[in-house]
Amino acid sequence: MVMRTFSRSAALLLLAAVGCGESRPTTYPVTVTVTYADKKPVPGAQVVLMSAEGNVSARGSAGEDGSCSLTTYQPNDGALLGKHKVLVAQPPHIGDPEAPYKGPKIASKFANFASSGLEVEVTEDPANNKFALVVTPR
């Protein structure tokens, strides 16, 4: 009898622990390509998508060809379904702070969700989640 009670208690504790796991919203693969108007890529550009609710973001850093896959929870898992505001910022200045910045130049308006003018809508179909983001230099 004691063993049966212990087994039930252990089973209930196990079920309670499993039920307490963190549940995350589903993400969908997203790829962005950052270019200037002349189609020249902007390597190193930092991209952030903010969900319409404003509580979850996806981010990535553009490679040499200006493209990147975005990450929300795990590398390259994408972004939440729905509309997102977008910001694109130039990469941070690394190295000697006295040396001139030599990275790609992006107008500061793109580094703010409110002023960038960039928005995307993520769908369940990864083929529709490839976005071209065009920025201007500063």
Image (cartoon, rainbow, N blue to C red):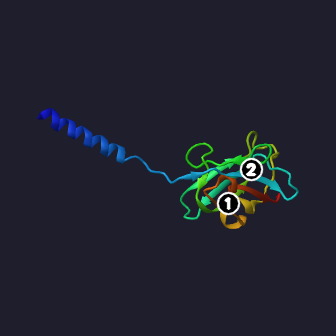
Q: How many marks?
A: 2
The residue sitting at the left extreme is 1
What residue is rendered at 27% in x and 42% in y? 13
78 left or right of 41? left
- Residue 43 coordinates in the image, percent (x, y): 78, 46
What residue is rendered at 26% in x and 40% in y? 11
Q: Nearer the viewer, residue 72 or 113?
A: 72
**Quarter containing the C terminus:** bottom right
- Residue 30 coordinates in the image, percent (x, y): 66, 52
Mark 1 surroundings within 10 Å by alpha-carbon count, few (fewer than 14), some (14 through 19), many (20 or more): many
Give the amino acid type for the residue marked by disc 1 in the picture: Val
What residue is rendered at 60% in x and 46% in y? 77
Q: Is residue 61 visible?
A: no
- Dot 2 falls on a residue whose secondary structure is loop
In primary-sequence order, the first of circles 1 and 2 is 2
* Residue on which disc 2 sits: 45
Residues under numbered marks 1 and 2 in contact, where contact means CB atoms less than 8 Å apart: no
Q: Is residue 112 visible?
A: yes
- Residue 93 coordinates in the image, percent (x, y): 74, 45
The residue sitting at the top extreme is 3
Give the amino acid type for the residue marked by disc 2 in the picture: Ala
Q: Which mark is residue 9?
A: none
Mark 2 surroundings within 10 Å by alpha-carbon count, few (fewer than 14), some (14 through 19), many (20 or more): many
- Residue 10 coordinates in the image, percent (x, y): 24, 38
* Residue on which disc 1 sits: 86
**Quarter containing the N terminus:** top left
58 left or right of 33? left
What residue is rendered at 12% in x and 34% in y? 2
Q: Nearer the viewer, residue 123 or 87?
A: 123
